[in-house]
Structures are given as structure tokens and as C-alpha cells.
Amino acid sequence: MSFKTIILAAGKGTRMKSKLPKVLHKVGGKEMLNHVIDISKKAGSSEVVAIVGHESELVKEKISKDVHTVYQEEQLGTAHAVKCASSFINDEDDIVVLCGDTPLVNSDTLKNLYDYHKKNKYYITVLSTEKEEPKGYGRIIRDENGDLLRIVEEKDADDEEKKVREINSGIYCFDGKELKEALGEVNNDNAQGEYYLPDVIEIMRRKSLKVGAFKGATIEELMGVNSRVDLAKAEEIFRIRVNTHHMENGVTILDPKNTYIDGDVTIGSDTIIYPNVRITGKTVIGEDSEILSGSSIDNSTIGNNVVINHSTIVDSKVGDETKVGPFAYLRPKSNIGKGCKIGDFVEVKNANFGDGSKASHLSYIGDADVGKNVNIGCGVVFVNYDGVNKFRSTVKDNAFVGSNSNLVAPVVVEEGGYIATGSTITKTVPDGALSVARARQTNIEGWVEKKFGKKD
Ligand code: UD1
Ligand code: CA
């Protein structure tokens, strides 16, 4: 048995004061709406429908193509929003409704809600929780037996009702047939002039259909994001969750509050992460590695026993036992082998760098294929751009590129080729040859005195 999910995501989110619709703001590197979509899929949803309104084209672009979207032109209320998706609701369906601005819900909570709903044969089950300061939320009103009577919104509540601490999460499970019928009967006769989804409860009760509230969530996971301040809170909760997960898997994180790891990152055991590190996208890091402060790694694969020190790595690979940094920059498509050294102020882009090769300081290695056990001296530049086009260079195994040399692409250094320091290489360096490409030194004796006179 499974359910369909409807996610309400048409609102603008005025309090965010943003050009971006609220549900596209990110928590842990992922749009809030995509969190909610993934959570519902993980809980077993067979189909997901998102109600979109503000910036609907942009929202559609950012979500997976298997999510249906329905356009709600005017935001007339949560019941109206669900009604827009009527064509997706079949009589025999179970429907879960979620909000696009509640990104921290646990998928297990949804599963539990659904199980509770089925077990009790309810026609609507509201997910609720107790909140010390319930202000702003709809309150759960129960009768003397504890049965659910209705939900009253803050703006419609009297003083007694405002004291109630059990709140509506905005998450529900419904019987498809009765939901569709009840939606036709909801009116907007209330303080906000909106069609309220929770009004379905009283409509169903009048038909003697069983309804219930399931107090099965923590207040933290139900947190809704309405402002940038809320967004920072959600980010913090998410960060601690992710970091706790890694620590439980055997990763040392010295300062979990100041370590920023996206939700889809994988890290092997006994790896140590120092404070102020960002690891984002679909990055995978192996075991026994050390990621030192100030490093930022995006969408990259890092091996075992690697040290990354104060460096930036984007869309790249770093093999086992390699050391990177401090202050190295691996730009997209850098593929660094095993046991390499990419030292301080070295920039690599779109290049393969073979096992055991070293570039210890101050080099640019762009558009290149560097073989194994190559030494790139200090200050070497791969000159890959003529102002119009980019070209590739090849440096084969065991070659030695002396300090402060330029390799003007396209150029090949054959195996074991040896380039004297300060050379500007424009032609092939043959196998095992020494290549010197610089002006010879000339000494003019006595020149200084002739020019400037004798020093006292
Ligand atoms: C709603 C509930 C309230 C609950 C709270 C939990 C109603 C009437 N009230 O209040 O009981 O405690 O959630 O957070 O449902 N949306 C649309 N189209 C619309 C209206 C809303 O897509 O026409 C979307 C919003 O973008 C938002 C979500 O539905 O993502 C909730 O709407 P919102 O207006 O924020 O409801 P609340 O006042 O928070
Ligand atoms: Ca809200």
C-alpha cells in the first residue's frame, strides 16, 4: 500500500524579501521543495504533485521531471491549493499533504502518520505536536474524550483556544474520495477570507466520518521557514543532523557547528574534518583523510589517506595518499593520481596528473595530460591559451620540467624528457633529451662602474 503526495508550494514567501520564491531557498545546499519531494519519496510516496504559483516556471525547472505540477493562479488558501490537484486524486487513493517550506520532516514520521491513519481507518489524520509557544499556528481542538473536533487558526481563535499548545503541522493524510467531496464544501468565511484545508475536519465529522490527530513529530522537524532568520535556524538544525550522522559513522569533526556538509556527501571512517570546512554537492571522501581548515570541496571524489589543506576543489578527483595545498585550486576536471603532491599556489584545470607526480609550488597546469612520476618545478606555466583557442599539452612519464619554464601548447614532452629551468618550450622534447630554450648568459665586465661611476 502506498500514498500520493501533494506539496503546497505556490506561495511567494513575502517575509523572505527575496526575488526567489521561498521554496527554492536552500537548506544544506538543496532547495527546500526538493527536500520535501525527496522526503515523501523516501517515505514511500508513489506519485508527487507540487502546487506551484509564484515563479512557477523557475520552480518547475528546479525539480525532478517525475514530479507533476499544478498551477494555482491565485493563492486563495490551502484548501483551494489542494483542490487545484483534484484531477490527481482518485477515490481509492490515500493522499498525504505537505508544505514546501517544511524541509526538516523525517521520512519515518510520514510513514508513521500513514500507518496510524490506516490502522485507525481515519478519513483525515492530522500530524500534530505540542509547542510551548504556539503563536501563529492552527490549534488542535479536542473534545472531552480527546477526540479531534476541529482546527482553529490563530487569527480566528478566542482566548481559550489560543492557550491550546497542540498545533497543526500542516501535514495530513486523507482518504481520496472524501477529501475531494469535502473540498467542494469548504468556504472562506473566516478572518483571513481564505479557503482553509483544516475545515475539511468539521465537514467530515458532520458526515460521521472518523477523523484523528497523530501527535507523532518533534517540534524541530516541523519547523516551517518563513524568513531568513528561520532559514538560518533550519540550516543549523540540518547541519547538526548531517554532521552527527557522519560522526556516528566514524568521522571526526572537530567543530560540528562550524563544518558545512551538504546532505548528499559521503565520508569514510577515521577521516578528520577541521573547523571551517565546506563539503558540498555529491562529494565522496575516503577513509583516513584529513581535510584542514579553510578547504572547500564541491562535487569531487577524494581518496583514502589524502590531506587537503586550505584548498578549493571543484568537480575533480584526488587519488589515495595525495597531498593538496595549502592554497591550491583544483578547477573542474582535474584528475590527480595517487601519491601526488599539489603544493602551495598551484592551480590545475581540465588536466590529468599521473601517480607520483609533483607540482610543489606556484604552477598553472591547464588543459594537460601529465604522466607518472613527473616533476613540475616551481613557477611552471602551461601556456594553454593564445587569446582565441585553448590547446592541450602532454608531459609523459618521468619527465622533469625545470622551474620557471613555459610549455606553450600544443606541445609534447616525451618520456624522461628534461627541461632546463627558465625554458620556453614550443617544440617536442624528445625521449630522454635535455631541452634548453633560453638565451645564453653574457657577462660584460666592468659595466656597472662605467655606467654609474666608482662607488666610495
Ligand atoms: C497552515 C495551517 C495551520 C498550520 C500551519 C503549519 C491552514 C489554513 N492553516 O497555516 O493550521 O498550523 O499551516 O505551518 O491551512 N499555499 C499555497 N496556496 C495557497 C495557500 C497556501 O500553495 O493558496 C502554500 C504556502 O505557500 C505554504 C503552505 O501552503 O507553503 C502553507 O500556507 P500558509 O499560508 O503559510 O499557511 P499557514 O498560515 O502557515
Ligand atoms: Ca506557513
Image (tube, rainbow, N blue to C red):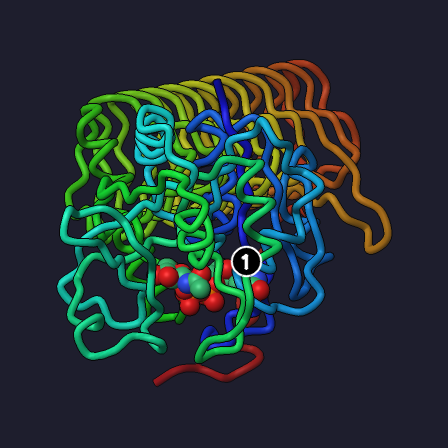
How many numbered badges does the structure rendering display? 1
Quadrant in the rendering for residue 424:
top right
Left of 368 or right of it: where is 168? left
What's the residue at 47%, 39% (across, down)? 174
Left of 268 or right of it: where is 354? right
Q: Nearer the viewer, residue 277 or 51?
A: 51
Left of 236 or right of it: where is 178? right
What's the residue at 69%, 37% (across, down)? 65
Graded by Cα atoms within 10 Å as few (under 14), some (14 to 19) or many (20 or more), the crowding at tag 1 reads many
Residue 330 x/y as whole percent: 51, 41
Residue 437 x/y as whole percent: 69, 39
Residue 428 x/y as whole percent: 77, 26
What's the residue at 63%, 18% (across, down)? 396
Element on which disc 1 rests:
helix
Name the quadrant of the C terminus: bottom left
> Cβ of disc 1 within 8 Å of ligand 1?
yes
Furthest toward the right, the residue is 388
Which kind of residue does numbered mark 1 sit on?
A: Ala
Q: Nearer the viewer, residue 236 or 182?
A: 182
Residue 33 x/y as whole percent: 52, 49
Residue 25 appears in view:
no
Q: Nearer the viewer, residue 431 or 343?
A: 343
Q: Badge 1 is on which residue?
A: 79
- In the displayed structure, 22 sits above or below 274; it is below
What's the residue at 34%, 26% (across, down)? 115
Quadrant in the rendering for residue 391:
top right
Left of 164 or right of it: where is 51? right
Residue 94 appears in view:
yes
- In the displayed structure, 424 sits above or below 337; it is below
Q: Nearer the viewer, residue 165 or 269?
A: 165
